[in-house]
Amino acid sequence: MSESGEAVSAESKVVSARSQARSKLSERRAELLKRISDNQRDLERALASLEKVDKAAARRDAAIARATEEFEKKKHAAELAAGKSLALVVGRGESSASIAELVGLDAVTVRRLVKLTEDATGGDSDSSAPEKSSSESAASSDSAPASTAANA
């Protein structure tokens, strides 16, 4: 019986090993299914959170667009008002260069603002008197160095 006892013992060890292997595989499968389920839940949460970021970005972009539009309207109104005032000064005979020097702007900006006013009023503004011509400006600036040269 010892041979048959050993065979039974060996067979029961094989059955026990199979049973343990099945049990371990079953546990691993359950862990894998739980991990997959947890991953799916967390990935869905991540995507939902990222959708909130996209929605917030869209709201931000819309707010920036509204603010930019409002700024552009206010900027245009302010530049138009400045241009009207500068056009009045030009109408009283000041040149763009002299106005620019007085207010700390460049002459190109002064001319642009005056032109903005002229364009807005259709060019029929009372303040659209001609500026000094460039030859008059050059002559007045040339006279100073000439007198300095004569004194030397």
Image (tube, rainbow, N blue to C red):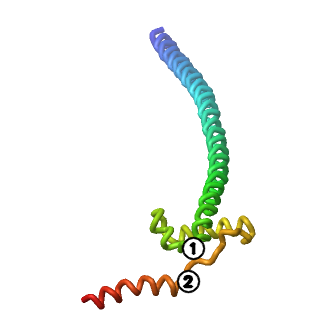
Question: Could you tell me the amino acid type at mark 1?
Answer: Gly
Instruction: Work out whether 17 lies above or below 105.
Output: above
Q: Residue at x 57, y 27 (%)?
A: 35
Q: Residue at x 69, y 69 (%)?
A: 126
Frontmost of labels 2 and 1 is: 1
Question: Could you tell me the amino acid type at mark 2?
Answer: Ser
The dot on residue 133 is 2
Instruction: Work out whether 99 lies above or below 62.
Output: below
Name the image quarter holding residue 82. Answer: bottom right
Q: Nearer the viewer, residue 148 or 39?
A: 148
Q: Residue at x 67, y 51 (%)?
A: 69
Instruction: Work out whether 146 lies above or below 36.
Output: below
Residue 60: give x, y in percent of width and height. Answer: 62, 42
Residue 132: give x, y in percent of width and height. Answer: 55, 80
Q: Nearer the viewer, residue 132 or 147?
A: 147
Q: CA distance from mark 2 to mark 1?
A: 11 Å
Residue 49: give x, y in percent of width and height. Answer: 61, 33
The dot on residue 22 is none
The dot on residue 93 is 1
Residue contact at pointers 2 and 1, CB within 8 angstroms: no
Q: Which residue is farthest top? A: 1
Residue 90: give x, y in percent of width and height. Answer: 58, 70
Q: Which residue is farthest left? A: 152
Q: Nearer the viewer, residue 15 or 99?
A: 99
Instruction: Work out whether 20 lies above or below 122.
Output: above
* Circle 2 SS class: loop
Label 2 neighbourhood size at 10 Å, few (<14), some (14-19), many (20+)? Answer: few
Q: Nearer the viewer, residue 122 or 89?
A: 89
